[in-house]
Image (cartoon, rainbow, N blue to C red):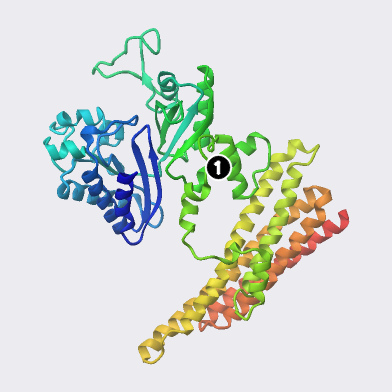
Amino acid sequence: MDIINRITAEIDKVEDVKLVDVDPGQATNRTVVTMVGTPDQVLEAAFQAVKKAQELIDMRNHHGAHPRFGATDVCPLVPVANISMEEVAKLAHKLAKRIGEELEIPVYCYEEAAVNESRRNLANCRAGEYEALPDRIATQEWKPDYGPTKWSDKVAKSGATAVSARNFLVAINFNLNTTSTRRANAVAFDVRERGRSKREGNSLTGKIIKDKNGKPVMIPGTLKYTKAIGWFIEEYGIAQISMNMTNIIETPIHKAFDEVSDKARKRGMRVTGSELVGVVPLSALLDAGRHYLKMQQRSTGVSDAELIKIAVKSLGLSELYPFEPKKKIVEYILEADRPKQLIDINLSEFVFETASESPAPGGGSISAYMGAMGAALDTMVANLSAHKRGWDERWEEFSDWADKGKQYHDQLLKLVDEDTNAFNKIMDAFALAKKTEEEKKIRKQAIQEATLYATRVPLKVMRLCYESMEVAKAMAELGNPNSVSDAGVGALAANAGVRGAFLNVKINASGLDKKDVADKLVDEARDIANRAAFAEKEILDIVEAKL
């Protein structure tokens, strides 16, 4: 851990880079480090970490269960937001060139940064691992993209590094109720995309069949975009299937878990749980939670926290040690640094904050909150209806409505803070200097831009509140009759959000110099208000009739 801490300390020194996860593996003798930040700063942090690893790790003495060929084995760059894969590929080559030239480490570029198709797959670049490097780097076919092509004491100590641009990779280990690496490998070969070599007779021990070029004929596995091997983890006393998933949209985590479980069962084993290495995108666990709720024929329109809980339980992510969402989910890690928001405080605190002498939160935030509460009530009715005894065959119908309602209340909750932020932008613009003519011009433009934004936010609140009334109407007509009054209250709250936000549109639009723009925004808002009023009456008529 001293070596690991000294390497990650180099990352901590770089501004605008956040070290989000350090995941050491004892049996693998391999640590996965995840950082996030702006491009140039991430490249600097990565370079300094590679440099420190070169100094502290001697590959001549390194052994571990995971394939490897360098002190910094792989350094993949992953686009998170506001950057294209093409841009990231260029950054990967920039980093690889610097590592090769300044540190004199052989570097291979793979995946989206690969210089040719044969190098796209990391396994090809790392074939034979560290032990094969002395011969490989001197060949025309496998000479490094950057750095030395001759074996030396310096290269022997550092080994090689693979740098890439790629999509988010999820590394997950599936725990088996066996200690046999061979049996774990059998399942890994069943599922991984590359599959296994075709053999004569016995599929495990028969002679490997080769094609006319002398290469093994492969039987593809069942899971695309996956790489997998089996190993024994001494610290836990179990065999695992270690899997890298390179496209979790096409092959999501839950699909891999179910497939590995099925193949293990057919070989007389059982998957007892799993272990996520490094961090994971929120969407991966939300999708898993929905998948397992659907298998139970239960509504998926529940909170993110509930979906994550179902995913963790279903995938057995806490079998080896507690799974902590705030430390393992990328979005939650990044949110840890943001200032506290209005929706982070409880309802009592929100009321007291609203009542204080501060002008924000004001009517716009309250309107968004009313709309969110209305959509939440509609979602509740949908969830109750999905679980109503005797309505089992209709669970999916109401689950779809619950999902719609959840989307509305999630978006409206975000607008609670956004409306306050919009007001603060206006205040900031008014606070700008106005001594010179140039300063006055800049200040005036800033005020107009902030005012336009502050008009559009409540207009969006209106639109979402009105659209959420579709769910309220459906629940009044189709939902659990015992909760019809809740659907009615949901409609009332939604229309209250519409009417309140309309007042904010009008008062903010009055501050716009371009009257044609202001009139257009107010006209759109008035149209939404009229339609919402009609929808409220329609829904309440249904409710009253049922009452």
The quarter of the picture where the C terminus appears is: bottom right
Residue beneath disc 1: 287
Q: How many labels does the image show?
A: 1
On screen, residue 544 versus residue 89, left or right, reads right
On screen, residue 314 versus residue 89, left or right, reads right
- Judging depth in this view, the residue of 499 and 321 nearest the camera is 321
Label 1: few (<14), some (14–19) or many (≥20) C-alpha neighbours in 10 Å: some
* Three-letter amino acid code at the position of disc 1: Asp
Q: Can residue 400 be seen in this view?
A: yes
* Residue at 20% from the left image edge and 40% from the top image edge: 158
* Residue at 56% from the left image edge and 45% from the top image edge: 286
Residue 530, horizontal then vertical, whole percent: 71, 69
Q: What element carries label 1?
A: helix
On screen, residue 249 versus residue 407, left or right, reads left
The quarter of the picture where the N terminus appears is: top left
User: Going by the picture, which residue comes out furthest to the top?
Assistant: 201
Residue 182 vs 349, above or below: the answer is above
Residue 44, horizontal then vertical, whole percent: 27, 55
Residue 225, horizontal then vertical, whole percent: 41, 34
Q: Is residue 528 visible?
A: no
* Residue at 66% from the left image edge and 73% from the top image edge: 352
Residue 496, horizontal then vertical, whole percent: 72, 68
- Judging depth in this view, the residue of 467 and 78 nearest the camera is 78
Residue 101 vs 409, above or below: the answer is above
